Amino acid sequence: MRRELADGTPGEPPPDLSAGGRVKVEERQIPGPYGAPDITVLILTPAEAAGTTAGIYYIHGGGMVMGTRRNGVESLVSYAAEGLATVVSVEYRLAPEHPHPAPVQDCYAGLVWTAQNASALGIEPARLLIAGTSAGGGLAAGTALMARDLSYPALSHQVLVAPMLDDRIQTPSSQMLDGAGSWDREENRKGWTALLGNQRGGPDVSPYAAAARAEDLSGLPRTYLDCGSSETFRDEVLDYAQRLSAAGVSVDLHMWGGGFHCFDSAVPQAQMSRTSASVRDAFLRRALAERPSQ
């Protein structure tokens, strides 16, 4: 069963992922994890790239139970259109039909395929970053941990936008919203339970499922984290940022006062939404322009 999310801004036509012909849009079936079905990736390639570019590997949101490879990817089209990056967005299996570890294993399989095919995709292997929003941010964090632990592939940055990191639902912010209409405590509980079943909140949850469970955060790539001050994930994001910093990871952290979960996509014309998008865009452009040290 597929639960669709709205693609783009509500009330507007679907975004033009080709940017008027400046981006080649392609979908491919690629090998999934060993013994699992193939997965689909959406690839956005600059139509006129001068040589290789950086790569953005993107994981969509949807509470672990909704969404497709096309959700949220419109925010990355400009980087392909300007010849700065090739974007690969993965379609992972959804809970509850496919509980952990299926979603993160799909995400890792897609990342490995992207790295192994970097040259054919026009991506410079040393300039590959991972990004995700909400549940996709949590899966991106788990996939980055897996890539670190398996020593492949190397990631230059991780961009975690309002990420879903902690299944325990014990922080003040995880309990402050009830019936608020923006991923409140009950929705959060349902999403994590769909992924983890009766293991949710227990002692044996893998950090690949809930990155806040990771005891060692050293060796991860430079990290961008942001969230609103009025959202369920606030405290777990702040804690993850602090722990990353303590482990020696360079962290860019932004908390937006009064912001609710994914406010920037829900009300993109609001001043705070424009500001947060601008700050994230500036970070991404710097990350995409960085060259690995020799």
Image (cartoon, grey):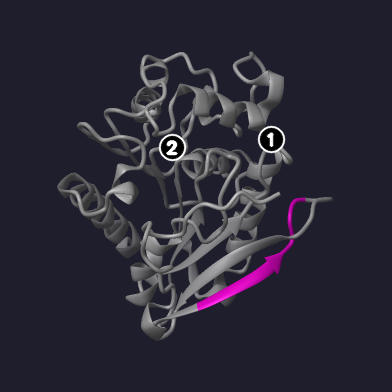
Viewer-side residue, 242 vs 190: 190
The crowding category of the residue bearing disc 1, from other C-alpha atoms within 10 Å (few below 14, some 14 to 19, many at least 20), is many
Check disc 1 and report its element: helix, strand or loop: loop
Check disc 2 and report its element: helix, strand or loop: loop
Viewer-side residue, 45 vs 147: 45
Q: Which residues are magenta?
A: 25-33
Asked if the stretch drawn in magenta spans residue 227, the answer is: no
Q: Residue at x 35, y 30 (%)?
A: 241
Asked if the stretch drawn in magenta spans residue 32, the answer is: yes
- Mark number, residue 44: none
- Mark number, residue 163: 2
**Amino acid type, callout 2:** Pro
Q: Residue at x 51, y 27 (%)?
A: 188
Image side of residue 73 versus residue 242, left or right: right
Give percent across and percent down for residue 284.
Answer: 31, 56
Q: Main secondary structure of the magenta part?
A: strand
Give percent across and percent down for residue 53.
Answer: 42, 72
* Residue marked by disc 1: 100
**Amino acid type, callout 1:** His
Give percent across and percent down for residue 119.
Answer: 56, 74
What is the CA distance from the residue labelled 2 to the residue labelled 1? Answer: 17 Å
* Residue 216, visible in the rendered structure: no
Question: Taking 197 as reference, is 24 above or below it?
Answer: below
